[in-house]
Image (tube, helix red, strand yellow):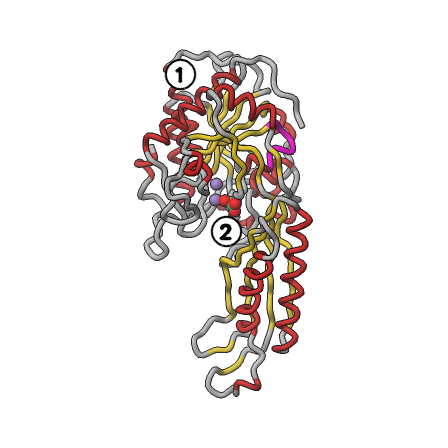
Amino acid sequence: MLAEIADVGRDPVRGGYSRPVFSSGERTLVDWFTDAATRRGLDLTVDRNGIVWAWWNPAGAPLQDAVVTGSHLDSVPGGGAFDGPLGVASALRAVDVLQARGVQPARPLAVAVFPEEEGSRYGVACLGSRLLSGVLEPERALALTDADGVTYAQSLTAAGLDPAAIGRDDETLGRIGTFVELHVEQGRGLIDLDAPVAVGAAILGHGRWRISITGQGNHAGTTLMADRRDPLLVAAEVVVAVRRIAGRHPGARATVGRIQPVPGGTNVIASRVDLWLDARHVDDLVTAAVVAEITAAAQGAAAIEGCAVEVRQESLSPTVDLDPQLGARMARTLGGAPVLDTGAGHDAGVLAARVPSAMLFVRNPTGISHSPEETVEDVDADRGALALADVLADLLADGAPAERP
Ligand code: GLV
Ligand code: MN
Ligand code: MN
């Protein structure tokens, strides 16, 4: 199935795939999903927040207490082939397996595709699930802009969605009895365990901050070194401080993966530099301490160079424990699959606040993700999809939905 979409959204410059939300690449994948789900006899709906749902409800029962699986089809810039699409393709494959087994679900089953999971276009990760569950105010989402100044409201309209309708959707949330997201593992956990599939446990707390440093734009040839107020110099010191400060806090991860000098010319001293900090730790207080120390380091470096600094939080997600009972049940269903934490964010982590949520991870033999080197072997992809089918079959056979958080 993934071979069918292997050429969609390839990035000839960065390598790998660039499939930002509402780009032609991501929309082509959504169409691919819609066609594939329709061919399986599933009923397609798109909710107010642009989440695409494919329903299988042979009993014709009301759409509630559904077992929901799925993932996302957007990518980071220059990302791998599996982050997101593996969960969607595995969900469809699991439906095939259940249909071939003659399963008649006692509860509805749905496959969901969430928009802007990566936050690579609009800066806030898991935008669709945040809006659905009400953790993000619609006004804030609508005003977000991409690198070209296109607002989220404009993107929604272009995709045929109504910006005025987005926001917390209790009716849709009320339909979800259980959510299980399958995902490529994004680290070395399963390599070290020598196992193909694991059940997810905790998702590391994480946030994003925009650090804007303002100096004096000027001419590269005529401005003497002593006369400069160069924000790029401060940005360089911030990048080094991020590594140093995170290294002082065991378990912390802090990254500057994006930096943008304005106006960005070879013979121009920048007038402003924006850089984005991604910081994570299992203890949300440590994340806050790391960011406070980085902010202080940025202010110190800016003062020496005669620049100004502004630090703005763009998103924050606390550490989440996925549903432990559901996880234990899944591990039993899978004959004692290992249980793993993850440092990556997921829609399952956002939904966990409102519905019992769980994850399955599939081995990634490179241990690399958010990069073209991310990979999954066919045999493991198959094991993952079969594990998902077994988990879904177990949940579907159970008339009693799990207790909501
Ligand atoms: C999403 O993959 C994230 O963890 O940033
Ligand atoms: Mn993902
Ligand atoms: Mn990702």
Position of 207 with respect to 159 (left or right) is right
Residue that carries the numbered disc 2 in the rendered image: 121
Among the 4 quarters of the image, the one containing residue 299: bottom right
Residue that carries the numbered disc 1 in the rendered image: 99
Among the 4 quarters of the image, the one containing residue 367: top left
Residue 271 colored in magenta in the image: no
Q: Position of residue 55 (x, y in %)?
A: 49, 23
Q: Position of residue 54 (x, y in %)?
A: 47, 26
**Residue at image coords 58%, 16%:** 62
Residue 59 drawn above or below residue 250: above
Q: Nearer the viewer, residue 62 or 282?
A: 282
Position of 209 with respect to 396 (left or right) is right
Q: Give the range drawn in magenta.
A: 350-356
Mark 1: give few (<14), some (14-19) or many (20+) Cα within 10 Å: few
Q: Disc 2, ligand 3: is the CB inside 8 Å? A: no
Q: Disc 1, ligand 2: is the CB inside 8 Å? A: no
Amino acid marked by disc 1: Gln
